[in-house]
Amino acid sequence: MQTKYSYKKAFKWLLVYLLLALVPMLIAIAGIMPESRGFIMELGVAFGFIGLGMLGAQFLFSGRFKSVAPDYGMDNILQLHREMGIIAFLFVFFHPTLILLADSSFWSYFDPRVNLPRSVALISVSIALVVLLASSLWRLTFGLSYERWRLLHGVLSVGVLFIGVVHSVQVSHYLAAVWQQVLLVVVFAGLGYLVVHTRLVRPWRSKAKPWKIVRVTPERDDCWTLHLEPCGHNGMTFECGQFVWITIGATPFSLQQHPFSIASASDDDGLLITAKATGDFTSSWENIGPGTRAYLEGPFGSFTPVEGKNLFLVMGGIGITPAMSMLRTMAQREDKRRAILIYANPDWEAVTFREELDELAGKIDLKLVHVLQETHADWKGETGLIDKELLKRHLPENPGDYCYYLCGPEPMMDVAELGLRGLGVDWRSVYSERFEVI
Ligand SMILES: Cc1cc2nc3c(=O)[nH]c(=O)nc-3n(C[C@H](O)[C@H](O)[C@H](O)COP(=O)(O)OP(=O)(O)OC[C@H]3O[C@@H](n4cnc5c(N)ncnc54)[C@H](O)[C@@H]3O)c2cc1C
């Protein structure tokens, strides 16, 4: 079947992941093997190498690399990043635990009287790992803003990786040969560079291609649309359903860099980005003056229509933005494919782009299904929340001719993913875009 995801691609990326995660271990066993020091001790060492490799792989599978995302989908990568981060933490945690179990004399590694720099490095890396994990799992509980968390996450990750590599080289039990040490440093310097690339090189490049916000228009449900035009360049080529990272203001080097789906049609000259005012960044949009600078990085994402396939769109609230791009593009290109839009909202007044969707239904083959939680007296449509039964009522007769796109609040996405699967829809034709990153 024609989809973007496949077992073959999944297998390819699994291999890439395994290779990266096993790099330190492979380098270690490629050299001259020292005498065994007992099973528990060697297991502890192996856990350290695997944990280090997995932490390194986190830099590639972070959702920021265009070459990785299309085969997986942005939200799958972020989920992988999150879950592998937890597993890497466990490997690293069991590394000293097992070694100390096997030989308690290794406590001296943490003793500042024996070796001050080494003990400081190992104690710091242990604390850094706990902070990394806890701040990622419970960011909101700690009241940490997304921007501060991202800065902390980046700095700690690079620090942990650096100390991990230095530690492996210094211990050098398995990495005694210079070529092994050099190889390990080169591979991890390459992975570390990915952060520099994301945080410095990419913003630097986007500096040469500034955008101008020509106006900001209000939409239903406290949403605001930015109308962006390129300044002195040809703009951006993107596929409908993709997203960009946007920085608003004089410089692209800002912690306030946020991802937003492009809502405009693919062939428009400018770009439209619509957001719901939920936090400090999006709430500031209504006061943005015309002419304000913006910097965009992208486009990213694989939440895009598959050629020749009809579209079954399940959207909730502001999750409608990538669907708007798809539907607007279909209208612009006089696309004859069928689109079914299941669009959930709290009430009729909150249905963002309601009027435009009616207009689009007059231009393209669009079946519009509004789902309202709170209804008014003469409401005849769907009510309540999206569930399997509702999806079943609107599932086309020929489900194999469609690709399925889900974007909205997390509970809606979970129900829709499981519901579609329960209705026999092939998982490879279901694409999700989750807005809640962490
Ligand atoms: C691929 C993608 C596409 C998106 N498209 C849209 C869209 O079209 N319209 C829309 O309204 N929202 C969209 N979002 C969500 C949007 O990025 C966040 O709502 C926005 O960043 C919130 O910022 P805030 O400071 O106003 O709110 P806050 O209250 O600070 O943040 C609310 C939540 O948004 C997320 N968030 C905050 N800052 C960032 C950041 N820098 N990077 C990533 N996530 C962040 C966090 O999960 C946070 O808990 C998208 C998110 C993703 C991942």
Image (tube, grey):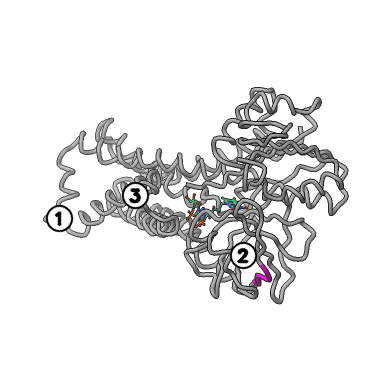
Query: In terms of secondary structure, where does tag 3 sit?
Result: loop
Taking the spot 68% from the left edge, 67% from the top edge, the residue there is 228
Give the residues drawn in magenta, as a range: 211-215
Residue toward you, 131 or 229: 229
Residue 96: x, y in percent? Answer: 26, 41
Residue 22: x, y in percent? Answer: 45, 42
Q: Which residue is mark 2?
A: 296
Taking the spot 68% from the left edge, 37% from the top edge, the residue there is 314
Question: Horizontally, is 126 left or right of 209 in the view?
Answer: left
Please say if 187 is above or below 201: above
Q: Which residue is mark 1?
A: 112
213 inside magenta stretch:
yes
Q: Amino acid at mark 1?
A: Pro
Query: In terms of secondary structure, where does tag 1 sit?
Result: loop
Quadrant of image for the N terminus: top right
- Precedes in sequence: disc 1 or disc 3: 1
Q: Amino acid at mark 3?
A: Phe
Taking the spot 27% from the left edge, 50% from the top edge, the residue there is 127
